[in-house]
Amino acid sequence: MGIPGQFSVTINTKASFRTGLNNLPDLNTDGLRDCQITAITNLEVSLKSGKPRALVQMATGSGKTFTAITQVYRLLKHAGARRILFLVDTKNLGEQAEQEFMAFVPNDDNRKFTELYNVQRLTSPSMANDTQVVISTIQRMYATLKGEDLSEGTEDENPAEQKWRRKEPLPVVYNPKLPPEYFDVVVIDECHRSIYNLWRQVIEYFDAFLVGLTATPDNRTFGFFKKNVVSEYTHEKAVADKVNVGNEVFIIETEVTKKGTTIHAEQLVEKRERDTRAKRWETQDEDEAYAATQIDRSVVVPDQIRSVIRTFRDKWQDIFPGRTELPKTLIFAKTDSHADDIIQTVREEFGEGNNFCRKITNGAKNPKSSLTSFRNEYYPRIAVTVDMIATGTDVKPLECLLFMRDVKSKNYFEQMKGRGTRVVKPDDLKKVSPSASAKTHYVIIDAVGVTKSLKTSSQPLDSKPSIPFKDLAMGLMMGDRSEETVSSLAGRLSRLDHKLSAEDQEKIAEEAGKPLAAIVRDLFDAIDPDKVEADAKAAGHPEPDDAAMNEAREKRIAKAANVFTGPIIKTLDTIRRDNEQTIDHDTMDKVTVADWAGDADENAKAIAQEFEEYLKEHRDEIEALSIYFNTPARRAEVTLSMVKAVLKKLTDDRPRLAPLNVWRAYAHLDEYKGDNPASDLTALVALIRRVTGLDETLTRNSDRVRRNFQNWIMKRHSGAGEKFSEAQMEWLHMIRDHLATSFTIERDDLELSPFDARGGMGQMYALFGDQMDDVMTEMNEALSA
């Protein structure tokens, strides 16, 4: 396929690019992770060998996009690539990719990528010829190839989540403005959901190297890329390399969530419109049972939402011990209406204002601004979404995912979990969460059984017997011109037309620009054989053949389909469904489970054993551990800096063994009922004492210090010697509190807070005279017992 007169030019250009590939210089590895170096090195070997397709599998958060941009830069600079296409499947991901290209600074140049090369994110069919990198949604590229504009809202939703799949992909015809050789390389982001059905022929239209990026490939992904996997970097490997963090699962289960509810006859219930949220009250006619799957869809039980949110409010400090502000939390809701209910409940239960919790969905107000604030600022602490930031969106400080919706797709669930797995530098985390020391893991709070429910692989290739209305309409909007689709859609809208109130009819007419009856008539007319034949004859075919009839039919369908945009499809779908929800205010829910997932005893024993083995493994190489294990009588010599050294080594090597997490395990095993430690440092000393046998059960450092101080004072005052004065006791109390957090007291400490404000070393000498050093030594020994 080619344009007359361009064939030889194309061949020369392709030959030049392939020659350039073979002359690529060695990779400059400065600033690159090992997994990125491996991916780029192996990908270039694949390109040089002429393999047309290559799959880069890298765990979410490990830097797939950065890797891809690094590769794009090298191909443009060193291999003579003319144009590269970066394909995504949602507008949000396209905007994010554009930002990453704009921020990218190569390691061999101090200029940004966009200062060196032209990058264009397609927002219309127009494409600049001097552009080296084109970022586009696959939906827009499909429309561009067909020479059509794209309907509003088409790029907002992930097409892979549609339940309907065509049996046969739609044809893509040759476009002379965008010939197959236009791009040298096509990079396909989230390729596990972009390479099938409607979209596959868009990708295969281009005579280019295809490079797929994904964290969650399935068998079809491997098949499409002919098993040419140039990088296999799993989430487990990323966690081991500290590129990602792992997760823990906390379960919240309620009776209504698990069993559903029954609304009884004569019960006064509230009815609420999904879209406008207008309310009215009525008396229930008869008993009506609702399954758990209908909760928050056709029936809303406010106390069920409240029970989950209140439990989260009461438990988060146990889940994240030592934190003074709620970690950044993302809640996954079932629908936009469900998200609104959650937000209202969160604000009430936490007693916080609008900034504390915001909705980030395509239909929300200023979602981009809210997302930026969620990522970079203290508020909001909680964001509620449906799909907009479920995949691909990077919010590194995120530490908690609360699932209030189930997910059946295995790949989609993995992508959603990926929102929490990204690492973040401690200083960057502290900017939005001041009390955080480091992001060692993230927590999934499962309030719907999402971690236990059966997951399926990606959607099958064949269409399903029952096609959801929204998917059917979206298919027509995106270019499905089959009679089956048009006839089915027209029939459903015709049935809907007979059921609607005058108010709904008026709303549709206002948004669509014509009444629903006219929309239905246009659809039926578009596939009417007599009208199609008349059009074909008018186009110059007295005896139209199949090709002429198909061309005429396609034009009529395309004209009838113009009315369908994202917003009008959403309106029709909302009205088509039962437009009212029943609000059951009477049912009171009950929390049945609020605990860590799995067997609590086994989990605690596993963490405790791993911690104990780690301490013993390093007992001879870390000074503080050596003292506690080998010469415990010298434990009064263990300083704050020594304990910090243990903490750094521990959290660097084993993030999941952060002391406050290990404390929780020992607290369970020892049936400890007291307060949690104030910091990782004090928790660590208490845990080391527990492992080395100095304490038989878990004991807070501050509690032990206070008890030992009391015993020491009683012993000093019980003899015939001189008792401490009131002024001396006040000073000794300050030393006691210092030892509770800093473990030893030395002369230099007396010039620091709080001692400096009370006269420092000079005042202590005035109070204790030549006994000053002896008192400090005695307290170090007595209180470390």
Image: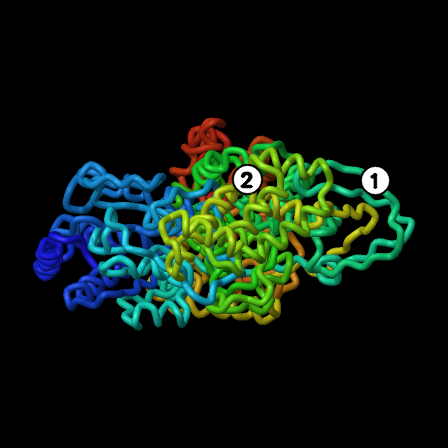
Give SS at disc 1.
strand
Pointer 1 residue: 281
Circle on res. 703: none
Q: What is the residue that sits farthest to the front in this orientation?
A: 542
The tally of labels here is 2
Pointer 2 residue: 363
Q: Residue at x 37, y 64 (%)?
A: 240
Residue 538 is situated, as x and y percent measured from the top left of the image, at: 41, 47
Q: Is residue 74 above or below residue 692?
A: above
Q: Nearer the viewer, residue 690 or 608?
A: 608
Position of residue 388 in the picture relative to residue 350 (left or right): left
Q: Residue at x 51, y 54 (%)?
A: 530
As measured in the structure, the alpha-carbon distance from the residue carrying label 2 to the one carrying label 1 is 27 Å
Specify the amino acid type for callout 1: Trp
Specify the amino acid type for callout 2: Gly
The 10 Å Cα crowd at callout 1, few under 14, some 14 to 19, many 20 or more, is few
Q: Residue at x 42, y 67 (%)?
A: 614
Residue 488 is situated, as x and y percent measured from the top left of the image, at: 58, 57
Can residue 743 be spotted in the picture? no
Q: Is residue 658 above or below residue 575?
A: below
Q: Residue at x 83, y 40 (%)?
A: 281
Locate residue 543: give its quadrant: bottom left
